[in-house]
Structures are given as structure tokens and as C-alpha cells.
Image (spheres, rainbow, N blue to C red):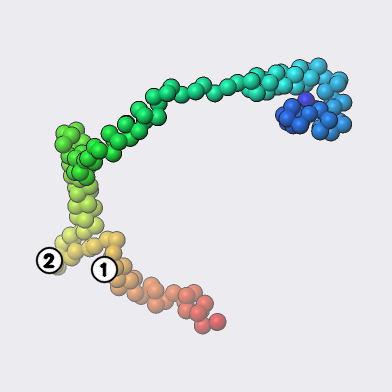
Amino acid sequence: MKCENIREALMEAVISGPEAVSPEVQEHLRNCAACAEQLTSLRRTMALLDEWQAPEPSPYFSSRLRARVREEAAVQPAGWLAWLRRPVVAVAAMVLVGIGVSLLEVGHFQGRNILATNDGTVRVSVQGNGVSDLQYLDKNAELFSEFDALDGASSTE
């Protein structure tokens, strides 16, 4: 077996004991000094963790924590418009609203093209909506009526 495959089984050998691992792993650990050293290191680390004791909190920890929780609960939450008191946030919000409105207005006027024809009439071409689609269909009605591929596909079914 390769050392990379054995290293995955080392933790099982530490937790369950060397008898719980497969015979191939035990044989590899007897023959490979690097893997045996890693197993020994893992066992020492686990022994140190078994000896470790969590520190006890100070005797006044609970009372100070309860007092802090009472203080935070007593503080009145700020209103939802409290952020407007900060000038930087208010100015940034106003700038964003202004940019949004200006983008909407620019997009609204970009979709219209006013065209003057030779006979003196004025045509308004609106792009990106149903009116422009109808204008396109009206302009190309002859082409679509002579296009038999669409009619042939629906008549064969």
C-alpha cells in the first residue's frame, strides 16, 4: 500500500487501537518508518488533548453577562430612518436615486426616433415595443406573404 492511502487510516488506528485496522495497514506501519512516526505523533497529540482541562470562568462572569444583556435590552432601537442622520449615507442614497432616475429617463427617450419624410410628414418610430413590431410587420408584409416555408410547414401537419 502507498503512504497516502495509509495516512487516511491512521486516525482510525489512533482512535480504535492498532487491532482495529486491516492487516495490510499493520504490515505497512511495521515496514514504513515515516508512517509509524506519524502514528506515534498522532497518539501523543491525542494524549495531550485528553489531559487538557477547559479553564473555569471567573465567578462574576454570569452576573456581568446578565447585566450586559439587560442593558442591551433596555436600549431603544433606532427608527428605520435613523441612518438618514448620517450625512454621508444620506448623500450617497440621494446620488444613487438620482442616477437611477436619470438612467430611466435616458432609456425612455432613446427608444424614440423622430423621422421627417420627403413628403413633409413626420413619423415617430418607437423601438423595443409592440408598436415597432407592428411597423416592421407592416413594412415587410409582402416578403412574409411570399415566404412559403412557414406556410408549408403548417400545412403538412
Mark sitting on residue 131: 1
Is disc 1 in contact with disc 2, using a CB cutoff of under 8 Å?
no
Instruction: Count residues near mark 1 (Cα–Cα under 10 Å), then give few for <14, some for 14-19, many for 20+.
Output: few
Q: What residue lies at 17% left-to-right and 60% top-to-bottom?
A: 114
Q: In the image, is residue 37 above or below residue 126?
A: above
Precedes in sequence: disc 1 or disc 2: 2
Residue 14 visible from this viewpoint? yes
Between circles 1 and 2, the one closer to the viewer is 1
Q: Position of residue 21 (x, y in %)?
A: 81, 32
Q: Quadrant of residue 30?
A: top right
Residue 93 visible from this viewpoint? no
Q: Position of residue 1 (x, y in %)?
A: 83, 29
Helix, strand or loop under label 1: helix
Q: What residue lies at 76% left-to-right and 31% top-to-bottom?
A: 16
Q: Position of residue 78 (x, y in %)?
A: 21, 40
What residue type is disc 1 on? Val
Viewer-nearest residue: 22 or 84: 22
Q: What residue lies at 36% left-to-right and 75% top-to-bottom?
A: 142
Which residue lies most toward the left here?
120
Q: In the image, is residue 121 above or below residue 87?
A: below
Q: In the image, is residue 16 above or below residue 114?
A: above
Q: Position of residue 45 (x, y in %)?
A: 67, 20
Q: In the image, is residue 40 above or below residue 130?
A: above
Which residue is identified by label 2?
120
Viewer-nearest residue: 16 or 102: 16
Q: What residue lies at 21% left-to-right and 36% top-to-bottom?
A: 89
Instruction: Count residues near mark 2 (Cα–Cα under 10 Å), then give few for <14, some for 14-19, many for 20+.
Output: few
Q: Is residue 74 left or right of residue 26?
A: left
